[in-house]
Image: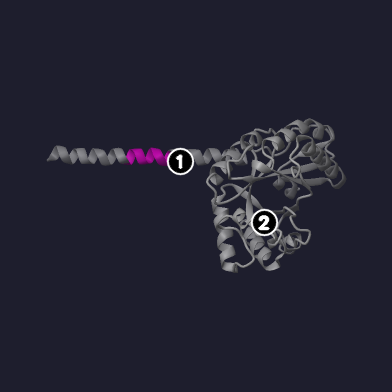
Amino acid sequence: MKKMYLLSISKKVLLYILLCFFLIAILIIVSKLKEAYFDNSRSSSLNTGEIKGRVVIIIDDFGNNGAGTKEMLQINRPLTCAVIPFLEYTKSDAREIVLHGHEVIIHMPMEPHKGNPKWLGDKGITVDLDIDTIQNIIKDAIEDVPFAVGMNNHMGSKVTENRVIMETIIMMLKENNMYIVDSKTSENSIVKEVAIENNVPYLERLVFLDNDKSLLSIKKQLKLLGELAIKHETAVAIGHVGPEGGVVTAQAIKEMIPELEAMGIEIVPASMILKN
């Protein structure tokens, strides 16, 4: 009887020790991720010459483990990576982005004027939703994408024209100290206006890199991005992983880095532009 009692105690002690080791392992992993994000992030490009302009390169559609994900993360310059929430690879892609020294933002699905409703997923923002539902979706998205410091819109030509919805979203971002990037899928977007009114840091896309998915075309768009940055001091471009760009877009960025830096262009994460 005493032997059985001691055996039971030993099992409990062993389980307690294993649990402690498990918790310590989790804390170590979280600590390493935080170090990668806050200490080892690529705060700017390696350009050491005269800086004539700064560019932000946002890469949309992470979260799907899409084509070009690995190649994009291996680029040795700071990218701003937009992760779609609520997908199978959302969290793992966000962690990999941070570990590779890039910046994470939420790529929030929003209703377009035209397009396949299925592209919005189960928790896309649509104009028929009430305010409470929109707030809950944004809250869930912020919780679902680890290390996110901002948000841009996935599609969204219809939603970004809606003042009530954009005020709701932007106020949620303000509460969480996050910035917003307007992908500018609508010329009638009111995102900039609402962001300025509410003192929320704001950027907007000037160039789409891979509407034409050929290597030559993407390189031309990157050169245009650099020229716009020299003219305006800063410029923002959007490219993609997955079928919209992927491996070819990553190749174009990698091959154009020397030319951009020779032009005096510094590649920086979105947060650095906004801080400056």
Q: Residue at x 84, y 45 (%)?
A: 228
Q: Name the residue under label 2.
A: 115
Q: Name the residue under label 1.
A: 26
Q: Residue at x 68, y 59 (%)?
A: 112
Does residue 135 show up? yes
Identify the element where label 1 is drawn: helix
Q: Which residue is drawn at 74% across and 32% down?
A: 46
Q: Relative to residue 156, is residue 275 depicted above or below? A: above
Amino acid type for the residue under numbered disc 1: Ile
Amino acid type for the residue under numbered disc 2: Gly
Task: Give residue 200's mark.
Answer: none
Does residue 241 show up? no
Image position of 20 (left or right of 143): left
Figure quadrant of residue 251: top right
Identify the element where label 2 is drawn: loop
Query: Which contiguous range is marked in magenta?
Result: 16-24
Q: Where is residue 210 in the image (x, y as percent from the top left)?
A: 74, 42
Which one is earlier in the sequence, the residue at label 2 or at label 1?
A: 1
Kindly report which numbered mark, 2 or 1, lies closer to the viewer in this rendering. Answer: 2
Figure quadrant of residue 116: bottom right
By secondary structure, the bulk of the magenta-drawn segment is best described as helix
